[in-house]
Image (cartoon, grey):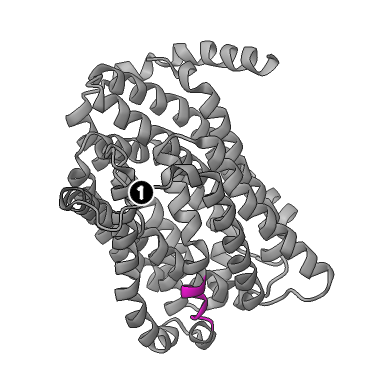
């Protein structure tokens, strides 16, 4: 199995993930550097609730040939979840705001359903594109969102009309709505619909999706616990400082999203074709290649924390440098659990990754509850690193039991790096 067969898609994936980096830099200069700490903290809280709701969303099984039944079932399940969850969240918005020490949170909660409605078309279209391996279209979909978002922020800033969490949330609603139209237009010919999908498709999607849904719940609790607990124990302003460091981890988010875009469909296809040895080979190569890149990224963030803060934030977020140094260590463990989880999902064993996720989430919540009380926001940093290390070890053990890769096999992949770089250089010249 050679990566060269997927190099073009890999280059489009790299281009797509570069958008996240560009957006992250623009967001630092145009939003984080402009908004007051408390306003940034409120924006982060509302955005995280939206992300929790939306990311529990569409779980498509791309091996189902009847795409009309597949899309219809996924949409019904997604909308059913939101219709059931949103009223409860709306009723709890004020008590939740009191717990988070943020009355402004309750006043801005109406943006959660607005964001979901605006983003739904994009979420659905990107899932269809991912299943069809249409990485180039995903790039244009993301460009429409990120580009418009930054353009609107810049324009309102120049007009002197940007400076609150409400302003940023309004911009996101508009950007998501436009991106949904663009995204659906890009894959409109691939959209199929059946008002009454067969029961077998519903059963398969629900059976497989319940593990992905459970993993999604755990993943969102795992990812968002720190922000909510920092707000509850320390306050929204400290959330702003913590987020100023966490936003640098978009470097790692780009990696996770690229794996979801490329590795999961690739492993699924190899599994469907019964190419077990190729799964092992691709896994070993991907682990070694990406571990080298992620280690380099970790060093840049750890060593350059002071320089990065001076460059992006000036003196607005004093103390955030130590948060960044600690959070950067997550990069040392990321490749192991992300790729292992992708393998388990692709070979039909999401139950294994689900159990590991549950254990890691319980540990992460417990560590955050204990350490934030003791160390403040830095406790969330320590909890994140320890929980990620735990997750990486357990997920890799589960993947090894299924794929049976070897440590020697991973180490010898260092010989492939030179060949891979030469191939990229040759393709680039062309």
**Depth order, front residue of 338/331:** 338
**Depth order, front residue of 252/57:** 57
Q: State which quadrant residue 169 falls in.
A: bottom right
Would you say residue 354 is visible in this rendering?
yes
Q: Kindly identify the residue that appears in the image at 17 percent across and 51 percent down.
A: 207
Q: SS at mark 1?
A: helix
- Indicate whether 192 appears above or below 358: above
Assess whether residue 430 is covered by the magenta stretch: no
Would you say residue 370 is visible in this rendering?
no
Quarter of the image with the N terminus is top left
Q: State which quadrant residue 237 falls in.
A: bottom right
**Depth order, front residue of 246/94:** 94
Which residue position is annotated with label 1? Answer: 388
Assess whether residue 110 is covered by the magenta stretch: yes
- Indicate whether 275 appears above or below 177: above
Q: Is residue 65 left or right of residue 98?
A: left
On the image, the x and y values in percent for residue 209 come to: 24, 52
On the image, the x and y values in percent for residue 17 come to: 57, 41
Q: Kindly identify the residue that appears in the image at 77 percent across and 70 percent down.
A: 156
Q: State which quadrant residue 98 falls in.
A: bottom left
- Indicate whether 387 appears above or below 315: above
Q: Which residues are magenta?
A: 108-114
């Amino acid at each position: 199995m050679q990566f060269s067969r997927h190099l073009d898609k890999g280059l489009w994936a790299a281009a797509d993930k570069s958008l996240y980096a560009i957006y992250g830099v623009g967001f630092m200069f145009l939003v984080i550097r402009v908004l007051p700490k408390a306003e940034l903290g409120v924006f982060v809280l509302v955005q995280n609730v939206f992300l929790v709701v939306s990311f529990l969303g569409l779980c498509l099984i791309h091996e189902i040939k009847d795409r009309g039944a597949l899309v219809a079932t996924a949409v019904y399940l997604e909308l059913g979840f939101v219709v059931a969850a949103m009223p409860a969240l709306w009723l709890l918005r004020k008590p939740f705001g009191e717990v988070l020490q943020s009355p402004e949170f309750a006043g801005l909660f109406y943006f959660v359903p607005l964001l979901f409605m605006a983003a739904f078309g994009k979420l659905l279209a990107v899932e269809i594109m991912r299943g069809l391996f249409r990485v180039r279209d995903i790039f244009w979909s993301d460009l429409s969102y990120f580009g418009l978002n930054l353009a609107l922020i810049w324009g309102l800033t120049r007009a002197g009309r940007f400076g609150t969490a409400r302003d940023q949330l309004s911009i996101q609603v508009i950007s998501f709505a436009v991106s949904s139209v663009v995204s659906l237009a890009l894959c409109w010919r691939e959209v199929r619909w059946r008002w009454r999908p067969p029961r077998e498709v519903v059963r398969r999607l629900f059976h497989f999706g319940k593990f992905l849904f459970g993993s999604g719940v755990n993943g969102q609790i795992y990812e968002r616990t720190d922000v909510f607990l920092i707000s509850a124990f320390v306050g929204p302003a400290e959330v702003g400082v913590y987020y100023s460091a966490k936003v640098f981890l978009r470097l790692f988010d780009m990696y996770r999203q690229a794996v979801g875009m490329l590795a999961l469909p690739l492993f699924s296809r190899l599994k469907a074709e019964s190419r077990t040895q190729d799964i092992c080979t691709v896994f070993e190569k991907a682990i070694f290649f990406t571990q080298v890149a992620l280690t380099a990224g970790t060093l840049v963030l750890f060593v350059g924390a002071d320089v990065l803060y001076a460059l992006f934030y000036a003196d607005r977020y004093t103390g955030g440098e130590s948060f960044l140094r600690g959070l950067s260590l997550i990069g040392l463990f990321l490749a192991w659990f992300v790729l292992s989880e992708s393998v388990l999902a692709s070979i039909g064993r999401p139950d294994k990754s689900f159990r590991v996720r549950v254990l890691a989430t319980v540990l992460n919540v417990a560590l955050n509850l204990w350490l934030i009380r003791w160390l403040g926001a830095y406790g969330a940093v320590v909890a994140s690193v320890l929980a990620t290390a735990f997750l990486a070890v357990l997920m890799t053990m589960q993947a090894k039991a299924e794929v049976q890769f070897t440590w020697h096999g991973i180490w010898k992949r260092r010989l492939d790096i030179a060949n891979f770089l030469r191939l990229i250089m040759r393709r680039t010249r062309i």
